[in-house]
Every structure is written in C-alpha cells, then in structure tokens.
C-alpha cells in the first residue's frame, strides 16, 4: 500500500533546492544528526557488557546506517552547491558539462 501523504511518485527522483542558503542549512542539520548518531553509538558501545549479556548490536548497526545515510545526504547537498556555484544546472551535470563546453 502506498503512503497517502507522498507528494511524489516512486519513479520521480527527489529534487534538491536551488537555494544555496537552504542547502547549507540542510547540511548543518544533517551534520548535527550525524554527530548525534555517532555520540549515541559510542554510548551504546561503552554500555555493552558481554559477560552479563548486555548487547546493543541492533541499535548500533541502525545508527551506523543512519550515519552513512547522513554522509550521503550531506555530500549530495555539497555537490549541488558546487554545481550552483559553477553555474551548472541538472541537465548539464548529467551530460558531463555545460552546453558550450566551458566551465568558466
């Protein structure tokens, strides 16, 4: 069953904003979330005690996956900012460069 609140179809890729300020604020938010996940992983690893059977491996694994997802989201936004700063649009980036062949 599809999510009724979904605003786009599954085949339509997510679009990033063309506003550098919005992208930078999203990078800051994802960076904060990434740091929270890393801190929680450290706390959970310190709290484990194999002798007493205390293990948090599932939550640690999930948090590590979240950290990787945050890394990718940050990288996507950094790349988008770089393309905006170079004056490239999505079509030019997909074709390998600007239509006239010059980047600067």
Image (spheres, grey):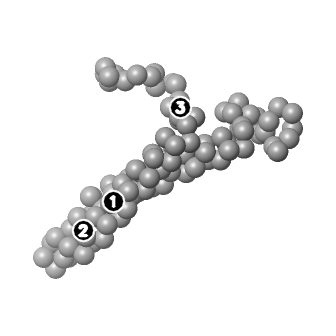
Residue, disc 3: 15
Residue, disc 1: 37
Horizontally, residue 25 falls left or right of residue 82, namely left
Q: Measured from the top left, where is residue 61 in percent x and y? A: 33, 59
Q: Looking at the image, is mark 2 or mark 1 earlier in the sequence? A: 1
Q: Dot 1: within a 10 Å radius of its alpha carbon, few (fewer than 14), some, or many (20 or more) residues?
A: many
Between marks 1 and 3, how big is the CA–CA gap? 25 Å
Instruction: State the image quarter where residue 86 is shown.
Output: top right
Residue, disc 2: 44
Instruction: State the image quarter where residue 81 is shown.
Output: top right
Residue placed furthest toward the front: 21
Q: Looking at the image, is mark 1 or mark 3 earlier in the sequence? A: 3
Q: Which residue occupies 77% across, 39% down?
A: 96
Q: Dot 2: within a 10 Å radius of its alpha carbon, few (fewer than 14), some, or many (20 or more) residues?
A: some
- Which element type, helix, strand or loop, lies under badge 1? helix
Front position in the image: 100 or 94:
100
Instruction: State the image quarter where residue 39 is shown.
Output: bottom left
Q: Quadrant of the N terminus?
A: top left
Q: Which residue occupies 40% across, 22% down?
A: 7
Residue placed furthest toward the bottom: 51
Q: Measured from the top left, where is residue 19 in percent x and y? A: 55, 37
């Amino acid at each position: 069953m599809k999510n009724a609140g979904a605003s786009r179809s599954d085949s339509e890729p997510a679009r990033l904003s063309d506003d550098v300020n919005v992208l930078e604020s999203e990078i800051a938010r994802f960076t904060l979330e990434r740091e929270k996940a890393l801190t929680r992983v450290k706390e959970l690893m310190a709290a484990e005690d194999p002798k007493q059977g205390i293990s948090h491996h599932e939550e640690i694994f999930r948090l590590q996956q979240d950290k990787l997802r945050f890394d990718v989201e940050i990288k996507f936004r950094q790349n988008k900012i770089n393309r905006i700063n170079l004056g490239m649009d999505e079509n030019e980036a997909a074709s390998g460069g600007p239509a006239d062949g010059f980047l600067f």
